Image: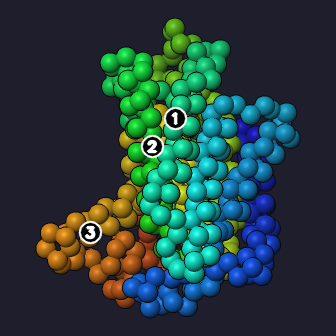
Amino acid sequence: MLSVLISGAIALVAALLGTPLLIKLLVARQYGQFVRQDGPTAHLTKRGTPTMGGIIIICATLVGYFGANLLTGRDPNASGLLLLFLMCGMGFIGFLDDFAKIRHKQSLGLTPWAKIVGQGIVGITFAVLALRFRNSDHRTPASTRISLVRDTNINLAFAGAIVGVILFIIWVNFLITAWSNAVNLTDGLDGLATGASMIAFGSYALITVWQMGQVCESVVNPAPGCYDVRDPRDLAMVCVAIIGACFGFLWWNTSPAQIFMGDTGSLALGAAFAGLSILTHTEFLALLIGGLFLLEVLSDVIQVGFFKLTRRRVFKMAPLHHHFELKGWKEVTVVVRFWIIQTIFVVVGIGLFYTEWLAQQ
């Protein structure tokens, strides 16, 4: 448990002290945000605010995780390294997207195909590796079984190992793309995505710590309600490091933001969230834990779909947070209330997770 706490503390300090240095560097290079013209007029004042702040979130997470391992004399395990690979890989795609926006001086970055190819390379690599690295208990970081609160009897390898791997790769890439885009859509107000991510990863910190204490010690004769998860301690360390990194970054990202996380941060955090749902075997529980992100995506889908069918709009603007802005809510009011909504989703998700464990006893 000490390694988990140290990981978060190091990441917090690294982000809190490192963010102002990054702000100075980005301002000196004039790496500022470009704002869409059809958005709320209040956002036009944000033009030129430094972006790509996700760099510090990623770096602080890495420093926290590896620093904690070093100070406690632990060796990193496969699950933690895979999760960090996914986070960094998707963060790099986001960095290229942010840099393209700055270079072209517009709010459009990489082409859709370039994003798809980049995300595909990272996602496929993660999926393939997640089914390898079998430990002494014959556990791999991920499973081909679909999971709710734990693995169900629905196995993607129902037609053989090769088919199972292919279906697993497709499933994993869908989750990574979906959650990355969901966090990306949520990142539209000062501190909104950062705070919501802290709450979501906070719930996964509780889940991984609980799994750490309830992990199955025997594959042949497992204890009732135990979790067949590999390396929950490493997953907890990464979770808490991300929370610490977001906490430190939020000091500078809260309204009025001095820096934005950009696609660098939103894609990295979304991918890490998807990776955690896969590695903790809670893929469908994540729909509750990431409920706010899901609402933002649904609002966008509903808006586009309804407009194509009727040429009318359901919301004043999508995603959902802009709708309430245009209704007259102050930005800070929208952010805090959306944090409250995210907290409610998380409480329900944690409650479902714990209730399922009680039912196994």
* Residue visible at 37% across and 64% down in the picture: 296
How far across and how far down the image is residue 178, in percent?
A: 41, 52
Q: Which residue lies furthest to the left in this view?
A: 310
Q: Residue at x 58, y 24 (%)?
A: 132
**Mark 1 and mark 2: Cα distance apart in space:** 8 Å
Determine which of the numbered discs, if any, sits on residue 304 in the image: 3
- Would residue 8 be visible to someone looking at this image? no
Asked whether the residues under the numbered discs 2 and 3 touch, taking CB atoms below 8 Å apart as contact, a structural biologist would say no
Contact check, label 1 and label 2, Cβ < 8 Å = yes
Choose the circle earlier in sequence order: 2 or 3. Answer: 2
Q: In which quarter of the image is the C terminus?
A: top left
Secondary element at tag 2: helix
Q: In this view, does 110 lie to the left or right of 300?
A: right
According to the picture, the residue beneath numbered tag 2 turns out to be 173
Count how many numbered circles sit on residues in the image: 3
- Type of the residue with mark 3: Val
Q: Which mark is residue 48?
A: none
Asked whether 136 or 361 is in front, the reply is 136
Instruction: Please name the amino acid that badge 1 sits on.
Output: Ala
The quadrant in which residue 248 appears is bottom right
